[in-house]
Image: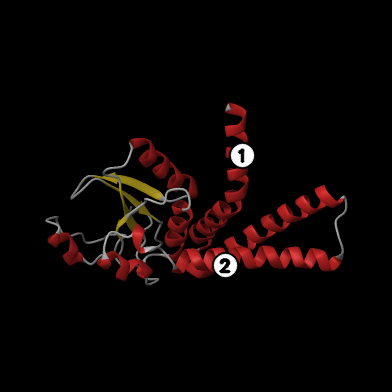
Amino acid sequence: MGKLLLEICKIVFILIFPFILLIRGAIVFHEQFHQSPFFSIIVGVGVTTILLFLYFTVFYSHYSGRLGSLKGIKMRLLAALLITIFYATHGIFYISTGNLKNEKVHSEINKVHPILRLSISTVVILDSDLIITDGKRIPEDYKKMGLKEKTHSLHYNQKNGYAHALDLRTNNRSEIRNVLLRNYFRLMGFRTLRHVGTADHLHISLMSHDRPYAK
């Protein structure tokens, strides 16, 4: 039973690794080269496309005993590219209302940085009960929550037009799931904080070049 579980975990990891690499590559490019959100994601798409193409080629070679024709190679490359583009586009522009706390969050989610949105869509595949409780904010929102208004917050729009932070619900969830979720985002390269201000939640943020040390 233990060996079977290990094999299943290995298969799952192999399947999701290219898409984790997409996000990690986009974050590295965003942080190191100060590129725009979508250009950083395009770089991640390129890296993932290459990896998927290698997956397809290894699989094909293993079962056919040959590399295949030039046309076959082009088809595998095209398939890898289309899968990656579809995945990235869907992840950026579609997040289920079931994963959003309310209509306010739903109306603001497209103002959250695309890399953050893509990372959420990816983790929802494994944690379908995940709830985003907050995304973009304005200074007045802190007053409404009974908190001191912040001069700087990554929940505010940055110069690129996007908020660089969002909050995830941790209440009524097992601590194991919360720890795994936090480690997932850390592994991706995001900054994480456990906040207990108005309610227990996990604060996820992407580095902003406007405020490089802000969380």
Can residue 35 be seen from the camera position used here?
no
Q: Nearer the viewer, residue 15 or 187?
A: 15
Up-down relation of residue 202 to residue 116 (above or below): above
Q: Position of residue 7 (x, y in %)?
A: 63, 36
Nearer-N-terminus badge (2/1) = 1
Residue 42's place in the image compared with 214, above or below, is: below
Q: Quick check: marks 2 and 1 in contact, CB under 8 Å?
A: no
Is the residue marked by circle 1 packed among few (<14), some (14-19), or many (20+) residues within 10 Å? few
* Farthest front residue in view: 1
- Residue 171 image position (x, y, % from top left): 26, 44
Residue 131 falls in which quadrant of the image? bottom left
Residue corresponding to mark 1: 10
Label 2 crowd bin: few (<14), some (14–19), many (20+), radius 10 Å: few
Task: Judge left or right: residue 15 versus residue 91.
Answer: right
> Which disc, if any, is residue 111?
none
Q: Quadrant of residue 54?
A: bottom right
Which residue is disc 2 drawn over? 86
Which residue: 55% across, 52% down?
20
- Residue at left 43%, top 61%? 117
Vertical side of 157 occupied by 149: above or below: above
**What is the x, y in percent for residue 107?**
30, 71
**Three-letter amino acid code at disc 1?**
Lys
Q: Amino acid type of disc 2?
A: Phe
- Residue at image position (36%, 47%) is 192
Q: Is disc 1 placed on a helix, strand or loop?
A: helix
- Mark 2 lies on a secondary structure that is helix
- The residue positioned 26% from the left and 60% from the top of the image is 152
Viewer-nearest residue: 150 or 62: 62
Q: Nearer the viewer, residue 112 or 17?
A: 17
Could you tell me residue 114's position as x and y percent? 44, 65
Residue 86 visible: yes
